[in-house]
Image: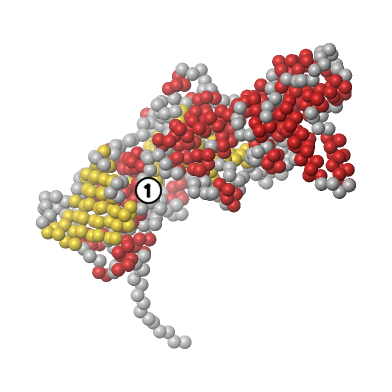
Amino acid sequence: MTIRTKKIDITPDKTLFPKIGQTGYTVAQALSELIDNSIDARDGSVNLDIKVDKKKGYILIADDGAGMDEEVAANSIKLGSSRKKEGDLGQFGIGLKAACMSLGKKFTLETSPKNHDEEFVLIFDEDDFVSTGNWKEFELQIKKGADKNKSFTRIKIEKLKIKFYGTFFEVLKRHLSERFTPFIANGEVVIKINGEKVKAEPSEIFSDSKRDFSIKLSNGETITGWTGILKVGSVERSGFNLYRYKRLIRVHEKLGYVYHPSKMAITGEIHMDPLPVTINKREFETENEYYIEFFEKFCEYLKPILAEVQKRHQEEKIKDLPREIKETLKDNILKALNETEELKELAFPGADTKKRSENNEGELDDQEQRKSPENEVAVVENEPEETKDRTPKQTQPNRVRFMTIAGHRYRFDYDWGSLEESIAKEAYLDKERNTIMVILNTHYHILKVLPKPDIFYHVIFLTEGIVEVFLRENNISLEKVVGLRDKLTQQLADIMAEDVATDDAKKDSQILGAQTYLLNPERTDVSLTENERLVLEQRLEGGKTYQEIANELHVSRQRVEQLFRTGLNKINRIDKLESVEEAEEKGIDTSKIITENINSVIESTARNYSIKIADLLGNRRQADLILPRHTVMYLLRKELNLSFPKIAEVMGKRDHTTIMYAHNKMKKLIENSDSAKK
């Protein structure tokens, strides 16, 4: 066998340069890379100005650091080239290029070192480089006449790829504050965004809660930090800031515990200098053996800290709504979301609502990925039963609520937590845990004058929090919060009115009034009030015969039958079924009989409730239409055994879950009435 060798050119394809910008950086993460370079170049301290011009479409980052000489400037455009040492924030030779290319398709770098009269300029344009550029002949401009007493570096990014949204600047300032608070607080860097200083915002903790720790690894290296309990808990500010050489790698990381509102006050800093980070400096290398060793030791250290945090949370937690009311409220909020067109559009942006059923799965993990009912923003589902325990249990399955936002599906829940007094709630979306969470503030100032938080408090701030998440995830200004909140609240009020109307029908006074009417043997008219009809229906649907009802109410069987047939126009199921069977034997189309029966239920119900059929089948949400509609839905299921989708079609193409809801409400109403009698 002979072997021959051949020299090959492994110069990378020109498209590699723009591809490095496809790193998934946020704007704050990309700017942080450039700020890292400025901090590395500081001589004592550094002033850094960031200008974002939305109209002209550029971002300018300028510092008064040490600047670059000709060699360093030339190497700064090379992929992987870096003269930085261990301990510097930027050390991989990728950050500047990746950050600039993630923000825009063109960037210009201008720099000059101190005691030097030359300025060096590099211009990279993605389109020009890909079409005509050459790795070996990139141009570096050298300008004479620079001020020797000044040093600087300026980077201007154009042809922006980013989108601006309503809270862009607020979010950017907050993120940069979180990342560089140690440098800002020590006076090592001053950062301005469009002339406004980014302020250091150290966390305020209970003085007696701070615990310093030091964890020694088997390789002799040590990781240090501290943990504490926030005076005012926060979803966004809880967790640990993970630093490497004072540069924030992970912000508010829920490290060593599973997040829950009861743990929203835990905070701290961990300085993990000995542990390696990924090339984009956004993550630690979690598969590294020393990271795993640290994580295991830190989890053990954290156990008593978590116990203390949860104990404090339990002591100050306000008494919540009764569980049944809270669960019903969450269900009704989901129903209201499905009725609010503006939020439907934010759930499925750009989608044709008529085609949503073809592809409506949320972006969940394998265990939670389910198909949503057609056109539904929100759904309630039962969690799968555990397969490990085969012992039968007489327990209700756990019900899980899901919302779809911007095409992605997330769990939904809410709870109480300790926040700043001026904040009513915090709403956030945790994509790692596929959860939308609203935290109501136990310290909100209005609660000082309320004996306890009523359902109005829950409704207003829950709906507002949900709308905020919808808008944020669709990059829409929060200026629309109030308008959308009011629309969602109105839909919720209409749905809750149905509950009120149905619950009112159970009052003892109504039952008593109907019984008084029936016990009057001299009364000959058959016109019934709503309450009287309800009592009769309860007894019939409870499985009682005419004779049993007559015996119970001390009236004749004929009287009860007359009232049912004339007052309610109830369908005699045996007669109808026999008619269908006879028709089938004779080869007659039974669909005609079923249609007649459906029409009979609708017409008689409309007549006896003194409403129009158009109103009964329409979309108006008046309180006096709720019970008639529920009655029709229930009877169509009970008397004719129609499927829920078929009833939904009959009732003006409503959603089938609405029919299920109405049927269950009426069935429960009847069961409760029977239980009360026993």
Front residue of this view, candidates 525 and 38: 525
Residue in the picture at 26% in, 49% down:
60
Residue under the point 29% across and 57% down:
106
User: Residue 528 appears at what percent x and percent y?
Assistant: 75, 20
Residue at which label 1 appears: 163
Determine the secondary structure under disc 1: loop
Could you say which is closer to the camera, residue 663 or residue 300? 663
> What color scheme is it?
secondary structure
Q: Residue 272's spot in the image, x, y percent?
A: 37, 47
Residue 543 is drawn in which quadrant?
Answer: top right
Give the residue displayed 22% in from the left and 65% down from the top: 139
Residue 277 left/right relative to 343: left
Amino acid type at mark 1: Lys
Q: Quadrant of residue 581?
A: top right
Q: Is residue 87 above or below residue 7?
A: above
User: Is residue 7 positioned above or below 536 on the image?
Assistant: below
- Residue 230, given in percent of the width and then of the height, sits at 41, 32
